[in-house]
Image (cartoon, grey):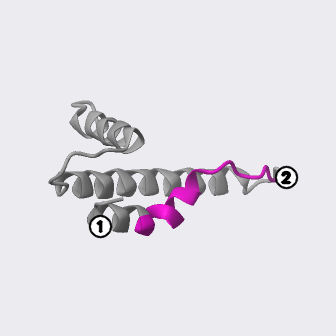
Amino acid sequence: MNNPDLSSCIEKLLPILGLFTPKKTIKKDENTEIFELASRLSELEGYIYCVQQFQDAFSRTKQDLQSSGLRSLQKYIHNITENEYI
């Protein structure tokens, strides 16, 4: 990749992106719902942070992206951040 800023952003976000992998199911008890809520809020916080970081990195990108995957991600992030309902 010929974009050090974007490479650095992706490298920094890799551990956070791990939050979005499927979770193991846990045995239900009286505390399960609060733990599930806390987990989902953590995922949401991570998602928002990742979107903001990608938006910042893409806004600093001065050259056209050659990778179709990165162009798709850039378009996806743009669509999310430009949605007036968010």
Position of 29 with respect to 16 (left or right) is right
Q: Is residue 69 left or right of residue 62?
A: right
Q: Which mark is residue 75?
A: none
Quadrant in the rendering for residue 70? top left
Circle number at residue 4 = 1
Which amino acid type corresponds to the residue marked 1 in the rendered image?
Pro
Q: Camera-side residue: 53 or 40?
A: 53
Q: Residue at x 72, y 57 (%)?
A: 31
Instruction: Name the quadrant containing residue 75.
Output: top left
Q: Residues within 10 Å of mark 2 (few under 14, many from 20)?
A: few
Which of 75/50 is in front?
75
Which amino acid type is marked by label 2?
Lys
* Residue span colored magenta: 11-27
The secondary element bearing badge 1 is classed as helix
What percent of the width, then of the height, locates residue 16? Answer: 50, 62
Q: Is residue 13 above or below residue 63?
A: below
Q: Name the disc covering residue 27, or none.
A: 2
Label 2 vs label 1: CA separation? 44 Å
Local secondary structure at mark 2: loop
Q: Residue furthest right?
A: 27
Question: x, y percentage for residue 82?
Answer: 21, 35
